Each structure stands twice: as structure tokens, then as C-alpha cells.
Amino acid sequence: MNTLLAAGLLLLFAMPGEPYRIPPHEEVARMARFVANQCNWASMATISTHEPVQGQPFSNAFSTSDGPVGSGTGVPYMYLTTMEISVQDLKVNPQASLSMSLAQTDFCKNQGYDPQDPLCAHIIFSGSVLEINGTEATFAKKALFSRHPEMVDWPIDHNWFFAKMNITKVWVLDYFGGVKTVTPEDYFKATPFKATPYKRHH
């Protein structure tokens, strides 16, 4: 049974543009980069500064992008405003965790995987959220606005700014046997997309 389930992870995963194969679960860093590039949003947990939950974990959803689908950088970028309560938490303590799951895509649904199933690959980043500017902010703008075009029309008076997750640890759960960890160095060295021409069998 496990062999059949593992084989399912190697099925072609349809992506906008050109399809690629989802990485094998043994290639943990590649899997992490794949998930980060596939997902358009993440759940970010901060330490709340707001009563009545001050000092407790507080999770919130944020739109993300690490670049174009199929050629991302691995860096999760966000478009934030200090009017948002989680961003207010970050101003006090920038440390946070960011989780993404292929349950956000059609992959797990198509394979019949529950979001909590280990085969429905998901990752957690530990680190801190940092405001960026200059050329990196320019890249982040293109990366985010291309996936989230609505952002262009968000109210100017909200004083939006670009930020990134400064990753210190990567946690990956994509198979049986428990969570695996990846160092930032190995994560950024990984090449998640090894293009495989899509051949439709008749």
C-alpha cells in the first residue's frame, strides 16, 4: 500500500504553463522549494501583542510569492501594512513561522489526500519577517502582483510595504516517518524544477 501511495507522489503535477514532476519525497530540500513555489498563500503564526491573547501564538493568512511559477527563488515575499494585527505583532517581535501545503492546490484533492495526510506535502518555515527595499522590493512587487493582481488596487493610504521571510529553518512533512528538517543553505541550493516534457498517453 505504501508503495502505491509513494508512486502517487511521482505523478505529473499540472502547473500553469509547463508541467513538472513533483520531487521524490527523498529529496527533501527540493520538495520544500516545490511547495513554496506552488503555493500562493501561507498561514503565518506570530506571538500576539493584543489582548486578550497577548503572548500566545496567533495565526493569520497572507498572500505570498517566491517568483514565477516554475522558477521561484525560494524566498516567500509578502505585501504588508501595519494596519494588520499580525504585522503589528511583527513590529514588536519579528520572529514568526510560515506554513504552506499542497492542500492549497489541486494536487492533494486530485490524489485523494486529506490535508493532514503526510503525503499531502506541507512545509513550515521558521525565521523572521523583514521589510525590504531597493531592487529586492522591485522583484517582490513583480512576484506578488503577477500572482495577486488585486494588490495593484489596494488602498494607497494603508502604507503598504514589501517584506520577506528570513528563513532560519525549514520543516518538511511529505511522507511517513515524521517531520524532516532542511537548513537554509540546502534549501536555497536545491533545484525544485527539473523539467520533464509532458507526454499525454492515449
Image: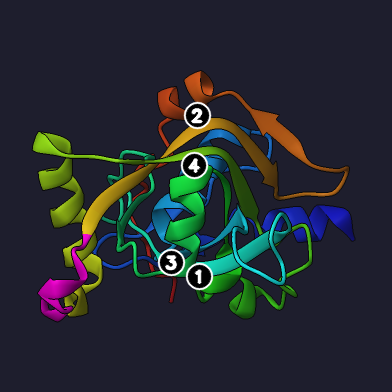
Residue 156 lies in magenta, yes or no? yes
| Vertical position of residue 176 compared to residue 170: above or below | below
Residue position marked by numbered label 4 in the rendering: 94
In front: mark 2 or mark 3? 3
Q: Is residue 91 magenta?
A: no
Sequence-first disc among 4 and 2: 4
Name which residue lies at 43% across and 77% down.
202
Q: Is residue 67 among what the camera can see?
A: no
Q: What's the residue type where badge 1 is placed?
A: Ala
Pointer 1 or 2: first along the chain: 1
State the residue lying farthest toward the top.
185
Q: Position of residue 130 (x, y in %)?
A: 36, 39
- Whether residue 108 is visible: yes
The boundaries of the magenta stretch are 152-160
Compared to residue 88, the image places residue 202 above or below, namely below
Q: Nearer the viewer, mark 4 or mark 2?
A: 4
Q: Residues within 10 Å of mark 1 (few under 14, many from 20)?
A: few
The kind of residue on which mark 2 rests is Tyr
Determine contact: label 3, label 1, CB under 8 Å.
Answer: yes
Q: Classify mark 3: residues with Cα within 10 Å, few (<14), some (14-19) or many (20+).
A: some
Residue that badge 2 annotates: 187
Seen at 17% across and 65% down, the residue is 145
Circle 4 — which element?
A: loop
Asked whether, in this view, residue 82 is left or right of residue 39, the answer is left
The structure residue drawn at horizontal position 70% and vertical position 50%, both measured from the top left corner, is: 174
Q: Mark on residue 61?
A: 1
How far apart are the two marked residues, 1 and 2, measured between alpha carbons? Answer: 23 Å
Q: Are marks 1 and 4 in contact (CB under 8 Å)?
A: no
Measured Cα–Cα span from mark 4 to mark 2: 21 Å
